[in-house]
Amino acid sequence: MMGAMDLTDVEIRILGCLVEKATTTPDNDPLSTHALVNACNQSSNRDPVMALDERTVDATMLELRTAGLARTVTGGRANKHRHILDEAWGLAPAEAAVLAVLFLRGAQTPGELRTRTERLHEMEDGAEVERVLVALAARSEPMVRRLDRAPGQKDHRWMH
C-alpha cells in the first residue's frame, strides 16, 4: 500500500479533491471524471493551480485504485470516483480533513489549517489541529512533517 509520502503531485491533488468534495458536496459523491477534472483544476483554494485533462485523471485513478487508495464505479454514462483513505490509512475525519487541505494548498500553519478545514471538519480549537498534526507525524510512516519557521512567521508550517 502506498503512503502519503510516496504520492505524485497529481495523485495528491486528486486525493485532496476527492476528500474535499465527498464532504462539501456529498450529493455528488462519488465524482464523475469530468467533475474530478474540474475540482483538480479549480483556481481557488489550490496551490499550485493545475491543468489536468481527463486522460491524466483516469490514468492516475488507475494508479490510486491499484494502490488501494481509491475506487471507481463503472457503468452508466460516466465512471465515478471516490477515495478510501479512511479505510486504507485508518484516518479519523479530522485527520482526513487536515491531510486534504495540506494536499490542496501545500504547507500551512496550524491556524491556517483550522480556518481552511472548517468546511470539511469543525475543529474545537487550535490545540485540536496541533494534536491531529502531531498524531499524523508520529505514525510509523509519518504523513506530515513540521517545517522550520519561515522568516517573519510566528508559527511553524506543516506539510504532507
Image (cartoon, rainbow, N blue to C red):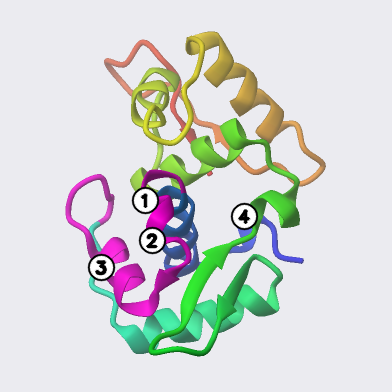
Give the mark nearer the N terminus: 1 vs 3.
Answer: 1
Vertical placement of 146 versus 26: above or below? above
Residue range (magenta): 23-48
Residue identifier under label 1: 25
Is 35 situated left or right of 132 in this image?
left
Foreground disc of the pair 4, 1: 1
- Label 2 SS: helix
Residue identifier under label 4: 5
Give the mark nearer the N terminus: 4 vs 3.
Answer: 4
Residue identifier under label 2: 28
Cβ atoms at labels 4 and 2 below 8 Å apart:
no
- Front residue of 118/137: it is 118
Foreground disc of the pair 1, 3: 1
Residue 38 horizontal/vertical position (percent): 25, 68
Residue 30 included in the magenta stretch of the image: yes
Cβ atoms at labels 1 and 3 below 8 Å apart:
no
Is 110 situated left or right of 151 in this image?
right
Vertical placement of 87 versus 77: above or below? above
Residue at figure coordinates x 50%, y 72% from the top left:
81
Q: Residues within 10 Å of mark 3 (few under 14, many from 20)?
A: some
Foreground disc of the pair 3, 2: 2
Residue 42 included in the magenta stretch of the image: yes
CA gap, disc 4 and disc 2: 28 Å
Residue 136 horizontal/vertical position (percent): 67, 34
Cβ atoms at labels 2 and 1 below 8 Å apart:
yes
Q: Quadrant of the N terminus?
A: bottom right
Q: Residues within 10 Å of mark 2 (few under 14, many from 20)?
A: few
Vertical placement of 156 versus 4: above or below? above
Residue at figure coordinates x 46%, y 59% from the top left:
18
